[in-house]
Image (spheres, coloured by chain):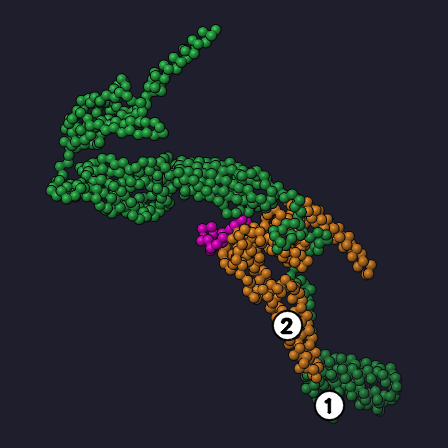
Amino acid sequence: MRKIGKLNLVLLWLFSFGFVIYTPSQLFGQEYTIEATVSENRIFTGEQFTLSVQVSGTSMRNVSLPELPEIDGVRILSTTPSRSTSISIVNARTSTSTTYSYSLIAQEVGSYTIPPITMEIDGEDQQTEPIQIEIIQRDRLAEDERDQNPDIYLQIELNQSNVVPGQQIIANLVLYFKQGIEISSFQPTAGWRTDGFWKEELQNERQPQAESVIIGGVRYRKAILIRYALFPSRSGQLTLAEFPLTVGIRTQPSRNDPFGSFFGSGANQRRISLESEPLTLNVGNLPAVNNALSINAVGDIRVERRLSQREVMTGETIELITEVEGTGNIPLIRKPDYNLPEGLEFYAPQENSTIERSGSNISGVKTFTELMAPRAPGRYTIPSERVAVFNPQTRNYRYITLSELRFNVIPQADRPLSAVTSGDQMPRLQPVTGLAVWENGSTQPILSRFWFWILLLIPLIGLVIGYQKIKLTNRLHSDRSYARTHYANEVASDQIQKAKSIAFDNDAKEIYNLLHKTVTGYISDKLNLPEAGLADREILEAVRNAGITGETYNHLRAILDKCATISYAPSGSSSDFTYDINKTETLISELNKQL
Amino acid sequence: MIHKKILISILLLFFTVPSLLAQQARFDSANRLLEENEFEEAIHLYQSIADDGYKSGALWLNMGVAYTQLDSLGIAKYYLLKAKQFNETSELADEALLYVNNQFSRQSAVLPPLPWNQFFQFLFVTFGVNALVMTALLFFYAGVGLLIWSWFRVDFKKGLRSVSYICFGAMTILVLFSSIISYQNSRYSTAVLVDRQSEVREQPNETSAIITTAYEGYGMRVDHKTGADSPEWNYVRLENGMYGWVKSEGLKVL
């Protein structure tokens, strides 16, 4: 039993040792890379360029030289490469990078492929990817024309020009400089005016890298110095102003200057100021939103909303949170204007945003928090809404439906009606209970009531009557003849009554004298004749002249005759007297009608 | 004859008292609902009383209180302003209005009313047009009586006539005041915006320029004469002195 145990331990030890010495490359896999690059992809005929093969890794022990294949259109100046090696230690892990550089010269115009380059690493053949190159004929520009091209200049380059408000554009600040110029530093000298745009500087992931380009037959090197994300805030023609930049450059002395390297170090260093050309951009209009809320969202954006709680008490605050997340114009997105139910008190809404500026797009999260305080209990419903988000790729709106939200508001516990107050200074809202004073129907204006006009008429009538009365009184006092005429009938009536009263005294003379006086007095008053001294004949003549003839006239004459002759007549009875008095009264009445 | 009058009085009492008691009973029921925080039911019952043509300061005040509880502050203000027109509830309505006005999240600047408007409003609220007209009528009676008396009493003629002219002058002033108040009442009305907000425009159409925005609870004076040709719009003067057109819907006119 013990022998067996010892044997197992020995086998385990041998297995572990074998594992340690055998596994690194076989079990953990390859830990190196091989890459071939050229200094330029477009090369002039006769121009020299470099082909580099870089091998990087942590566990390389045996690396052979690259085996250059035949390359069409190109001549290899030296088959022995220059070699550079760098070693770096990161987190106690050592990595080695070895670069083999070959000088080549372009010979024939055309497009060629540098075939895969083979290397043997730790006994295994490894190959690089093939590389496309293009050899072009050098332009036959005059030397002075070539000299007119600036040695260094700055340019703003946009990634697209057909945009709408809110759509992101990447603006690269690109520096072009000719061979022989080295850029040691750069610094924007002032702010860049971008009226009509929202501007965000994108974070560069690495230092600016220069690459070679041919512009107008001249080789330049270009480097993207700064990158901005621009969001047009309105449609129309918008202009990006000049970008001012100070650049530190180092130039090699001219070959024709014999003293260039004799007096100096061989290079000129100076700082120059550059400005890009202003750039004009036509920004189109966004299409109309179809029956949805517009929050000015453009990009790949998601919208969600939620309530902080489902049940609150009156007066407490509930939050309606809208979260907008994605890639696009997050900083420019507006708060959605929801159709919120009645009965809520609103406080100042809150906005929070987190913007991510790395990479080539602006992304992030923007949160709108609407603070609402329901003031009455009940069930509240925030209706569903459609929110429009413009997709710049499809040039159409994408509509996001936000579902309906509901919450309950319960009354404050033990909160009597009469205690609805808002501070010590606030009065109490106290309903009126008990017997109320009721009015039925509408109160008619007094002017529409009949009795009012009657009441108004009474003093007016009194006024007219009073006026007439005073006018009569005044005339009676001032006009004697009018007064006699006015009172003639009254005086005659009085005398008739007097005659009647003495009719039974059998004093014929007195009675007929009174009747005569009554008749003559009445006629003289009415016809405005002298009050005394008139004979019966004159009275009769005046009456006839007044147009009274016929029976009345005859009655008058008969009464006057009887009054004149009664002194000679035998004494009569009281009935005779009464008859004559009545006859006289009738005569006065007839005369009163006719005079 | 006396028996007939007694019979009529009994019949009147027989027919009117039960109806008065009925709406008082409904009012009491609504009050109980209000105290039990059943605001919507209480309002429904109050409204049925109002629909039957009965008016009362207490009714309007309690409706205002109920709407305040439901947070319909614009409508609450409307009913409280109605309650303020009744002597028995004027003071309570003032207190409630102070509370309600403080609850509005947006409040208009308020220009003080012109002195003469204030004066006529005081006369209207304190006396009313009918009382002023009746007083003018009494002065008219006194003036006419004294004038007629002066015609017949030569000894007091001058004194009587002077007093009579004073009476006519007082009557004329009272009639003038009554006419102005009646004209103002027929042409202008107080209104309250019960919608959340409404645009005040230059002209009575939707495309016209917006002068300002009125919010719930804004008081305004409606000019019925100017707005007579546009039934869907009201020509108003806001409390801050601005004039414009507001859509009739959402506006409650007292």
Tell me: residue B133, above or below residue A171.
Answer: below
Which amino acid, mark 1? Glu
Give the distance between the C-alpha atoms of the residues marked 1 and 2, in whole angstroms: 53 Å
Residue B253, image x, y percentages: 58, 54
Which amino acid, mark 2? Ala
Tell me: residue A150, above or below residue B143.
Answer: above
| The colour assigned to chain A within the rendered structure | green
Observer-nearest of A123 and A412? A123
Mark 1 highlights which residue?
A: A531
Name the chain under label 2.
B
Q: Is residue B175 left or right of residue A63?
A: right
Q: Is residue B231 magenta?
A: no
Q: Is residue B31 left or right of residue A356?
A: right
The residue positioned 43% from the left and 40% from the top of the image is A354
Picture quarter with the C terminus of chain A: bottom right
Residue A472 seen: no
The residue positioned 74% from the left and 92% from the top of the image is A532
Q: Decide: few, some or many residues near mark 2? Use Cα within 10 Å; few <14, some 14-19, many ≥20.
A: some
Residue B92, image x, y percentages: 65, 56
Looking at the image, the residue that sits furthest to the front is A2
Which chain has been coloured orange in this picture?
A: B
Which segment did they paint magenta?
B195-213
User: Do the residues at pointers 1 and 2 share their chain?
Assistant: no
Q: Which callout, 1 or 2, points to the residue nearer the camera?
A: 2
The residue positioned 34% from the left and 27% from the top of the image is A93
Q: Determine the secondary structure under disc 2.
A: helix
Mark 2 highlights which residue?
A: B170
Tell me: residue A86, above or below residue A492.
Answer: above
Q: Is residue A299 left or right of residue B26?
A: left
